[in-house]
Image: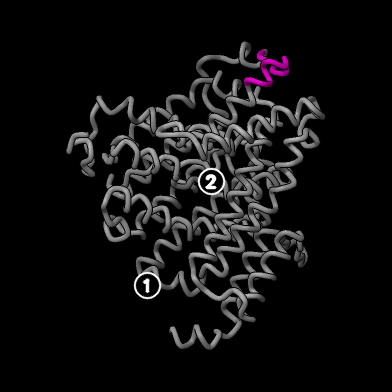
C-alpha cells in the first residue's frame, strides 16, 4: 500500500472513482434498508445520502473520510410517523431532528463538549438506545413470519426465506473475511432473495415497467408539531453516538477529528445533512460504521474517495429500475435481517452502559434505567390537549429529566 494511498489529505482524482463506488457498495444494503422498512423512497434515500455526504464534507473542509446515510435509530419513529401523519408530516419531525444536531453543535462551540456528559450521560443514552431496538422487536418477528406485510407470503415459505437471510447475515458477520465481512446485511438479503426466486415468489413486472432514467419521487415536508415532539427526543441517542463515530474513524486514520475540524463542525455537518434529507423526503443521515470498516481494511484515508461515493449515490438515484427492483424484495427476507439488526441496536445500548463503568445497582441508576425501559417498551403515552408524546420519545425525555433532578450518588459526588 503506497504512502500516497494512506494520505489523509483531500485529493480529488478520477482514478479513485471505482474505490468510491466500492465504498457505496459497502453501505448500500443498510442504506436502502431504512427506506424500504419505513415507506420512504429508496432512490430519494440514495440522493439524500449523496447530498448529505457532500454537505458534510464542505462543512468539515474535506478532512474526515466518512459516508453519511440512513440512520437505523429512526426506523421506529419514521414507521410510526408515516402511518400516523403521512410522509410530509413525518419529514417535518426529521428536519427538526437535524436542527437539534445543529443546536447542539453551537452549544459545543460555546461551552465545549463536556456539558453533554452532564445532560446526556450513558445512564440515559444507553437505555434509550435499548428501547429503540426492543420497541422494534415485534415488527421484525412479524415481518419474518409474514404476519406483518402484504400477507402474500406467510407460514413456512416466509419462515424459510427469513431464516436463510438471518443465518447468512450471522455467518458472514462472524466468519466472513476481508471485504465480505463488511457487507453482512447485503449478503443476508441476497441469500434470502435467491431463496424467494427459487420458490417463485418474486414478481419482476414492476422492474420491467419502470423507466431506466427517472427523477426520484421527492416529497416536500408539511408542518406537524406532533411529529416534531415525537421524533426530536429520539435524536438524542444518535447525537451522542456521533462522538463515538468521530473517535472511531480518527483511531483508524490516526487523526484527531474531535479537534480538527472539531466535533462541533462534524455535528453541524450531521445536522445539516439530516435536515436536507428531510426537506426532500429522505431519512436522517448518520456516519456509517461499515464504511469506516472499509476505510480501515483498504487504508484508503483520502476523504475525496467519499466524494466519489456521494457522486455515485446521486447518479444511481436517477436510475428508476433500482427502486423498482428493491421493491421486489419480499418482506420476510427483510424481517430475517431485522431480527439481528434490531437486536444489535439493543446490545449497543447495553454496551454503552457497560463501557461507562458505573455501578448500575445504585438507587439513582436503577430508577433512571427502570423508568426509561418500562415506559419506552411498555408504550406509555402522555397527552395534554393536542400535545402527545409516547414510547421512545417519552422515555428519552423522562430519562433526561430524572438525570437532572435526582441527586448524585455519593460515589459520583466524590468523583466530581
Who is closer to the viewer here, 88 or 244?
244
Instruction: Name the residue furthest front.
Output: 175
Give the SS element for disc 1: helix
Looking at the image, is 4 positioned above or below residue 265? above
In this view of the protein, can residue 138 be seen by the observer?
yes
Label 2 sits on residue: 71
Binning the other alpha carbons within 10 Å of mark 1 as few (below 14), some (14 to 19) or many (20 upward) gives few
Placement of the C terminus among the 4 image quadrants: bottom left
- The answer to whether the residue labelled 1 contacts the one labelled 2, judged by CB atoms less than 8 Å apart, is no
Who is closer to the viewer here, 215 or 263?
263
Q: Position of residue 78 (x, y in %)?
A: 64, 46
Label 1 sits on residue: 111
Q: Position of residue 358 (x, y in %)?
A: 52, 74
Residue 202 is inside the magenta segment: yes
Looking at the image, is 361 positioned above or below residue 228? below
Residue pictured at 36% horizontal, 70% vertical: 112
Binning the other alpha carbons within 10 Å of mark 2 as few (below 14), some (14 to 19) or many (20 upward) gives many
Q: Give the range drawn in magenta.
A: 194-204
Amino acid at each position: 500500500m503506497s504512502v500516497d494511498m494512506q494520505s489523509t489529505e483531500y485529493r480529488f482524482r478520477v482514478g479513485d472513482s471505482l474505490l468510491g463506488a466500492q465504498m457505496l457498495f459497502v453501505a448500500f444494503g443498510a442504506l436502502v434498508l431504512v427506506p424500504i422498512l419505513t415507506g420512504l423512497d429508496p432512490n430519494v434515500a440514495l440522493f439524500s445520502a449523496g447530498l448529505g455526504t457532500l454537505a458534510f464534507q464542505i462543512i468539515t473542509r474535506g478532512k474526515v473520510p466518512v459516508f453519511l446515510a440512513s440512520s437505523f435509530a429512526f426506523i421506529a419513529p419514521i414507521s410510526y410517523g408515516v402511518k400516523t401523519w403521512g410522509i410530509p408530516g413525518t419529514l417535518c419531525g426529521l428536519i427538526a431532528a437535524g436542527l437539534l444536531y445543529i443546536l447542539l453543535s453551537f452549544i459545543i462551540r460555546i461551552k465545549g463538549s463536556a456539558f453533554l456528559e452532564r445532560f446526556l450521560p450513558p445512564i440515559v443514552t444507553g437505555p434509550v438506545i435499548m428501547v429503540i431496538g426492543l420497541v422494534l422487536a415485534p415488527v421484525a418477528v412479524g415481518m419474518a413470519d409474514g404476519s406483518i406485510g402484504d400477507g402474500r407470503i406467510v407460514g413456512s415459505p416466509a419462515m424459510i426465506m427469513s431464516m436463510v437471510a438471518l443465518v447468512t447475515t450471522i455467518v458472514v458477520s462472524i466468519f466472513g473475511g476481508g471485504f465480505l465481512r463488511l457487507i453482512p446485511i447485503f449478503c443476508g438479503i441476497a441469500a434470502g432473495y435467491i431463496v424467494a426466486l427459487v420458490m417463485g415468489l418474486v414478481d419482476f413486472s414492476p422492474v420491467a415497467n419502470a423507466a431506466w432514467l427517472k427523477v426520484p419521487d421527492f416529497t416536500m415536508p408539511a408542518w406537524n408539531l406532533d411529529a416534531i415532539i415525537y421524533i426530536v427526543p429520539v435524536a438524542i441517542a444518535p447525537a451522542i453516538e456521533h462522538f463515538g463515530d468521530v473517535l472511531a474513524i480518527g483511531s483508524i486514520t490516526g487523526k484527531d477529528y474531535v479537534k480538527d475540524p472539531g466535533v462541533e463542525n462534524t455535528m453541524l455537518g450531521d445536522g445539516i445533512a439530516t435536515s436536507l434529507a428531510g426537506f426532500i423526503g429522505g431519512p436522517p443521515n448518520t456516519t456509517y460504521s461499515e464504511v469506516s470498516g472499509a476505510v480501515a481494511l483498504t487504508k484508503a484515508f483520502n476523504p475525496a474517495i467519499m466524494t466519489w461515493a456521494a457522486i455515485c449515490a446521486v447518479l444511481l438515484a436517477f436510475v428508476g429500475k433500482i427502486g423498482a427492483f428493491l421493491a421486489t424484495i419480499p418482506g420476510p427476507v427483510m424481517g430475517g435481517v431485522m431480527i439481528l439488526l434490531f437486536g444489535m441496536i439493543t446490545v449497543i445500548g447495553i454496551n454503552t452502559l457497560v463501557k461507562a463503568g458505573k455501578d448500575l445497582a445504585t438507587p439513582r441508576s436503577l430508577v433512571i434505567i427502570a423508568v426509561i425501559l418500562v415506559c419506552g417498551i411498555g408504550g406509555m403515552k402522555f397527552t395534554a390537549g393536542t400535545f402527545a408524546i409516547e414510547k421512545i420519545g417519552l422515555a428519552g425525555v423522562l430519562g433526561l429529566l430524572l438525570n437532572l433532578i435526582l441527586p448524585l450518588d455519593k460515589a459520583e459526588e466524590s468523583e466530581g
